[in-house]
Amino acid sequence: MLVKSTEIQENFGKYLELANGQEIVITKGGRPVAKLLGIKNTFLSDSLVGLVPPDIDENEAKAERLARQ
């Protein structure tokens, strides 16, 4: 979803909730300048879909990574 920076400023709470389910690209002057992501959307493997070998279980990899933190 593309949203103007002024719209984000005026309705931040609304977009904060929407960010839990989708990526929001913030634009300024018609150009993308930032992304707003919910915490559920920030795990690295989520952006590597198709690049991670099929024999690796995503949930197992997440649990292992989080255990190391």
Image (cartoon, grey):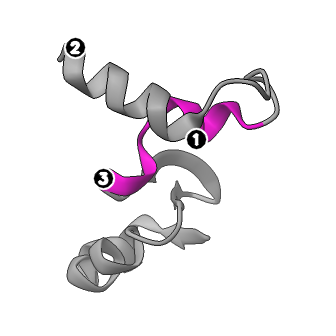
Magenta-colored span: 39-49
| Rendered position, 10 above or below 64 | below
- Per the model, the C-alpha gap separating discs 2 and 3 is 18 Å
| Rendered position, 44 above or below 9 | above
The one nearer the camera, 58 or 17, is 58
Three-letter amino acid code at the position of disc 1: Asp
Q: Main secondary structure of the magenta part?
A: helix
Residue 22: x and y, percent? 52, 67
Q: Residues within 10 Å of mark 1 (few under 14, many from 20)?
A: few
Q: Quadrant of residue 29?
A: bottom right
Residue 51: x and y, percent? 78, 24
Name the residue carrying label 1: 46
Whether label 2 touches label 1, CB < 8 Å: no
Q: Quadrant of residue 53?
A: top right
Q: Is residue 45 visible?
A: yes
Q: Is residue 37 visible?
A: no
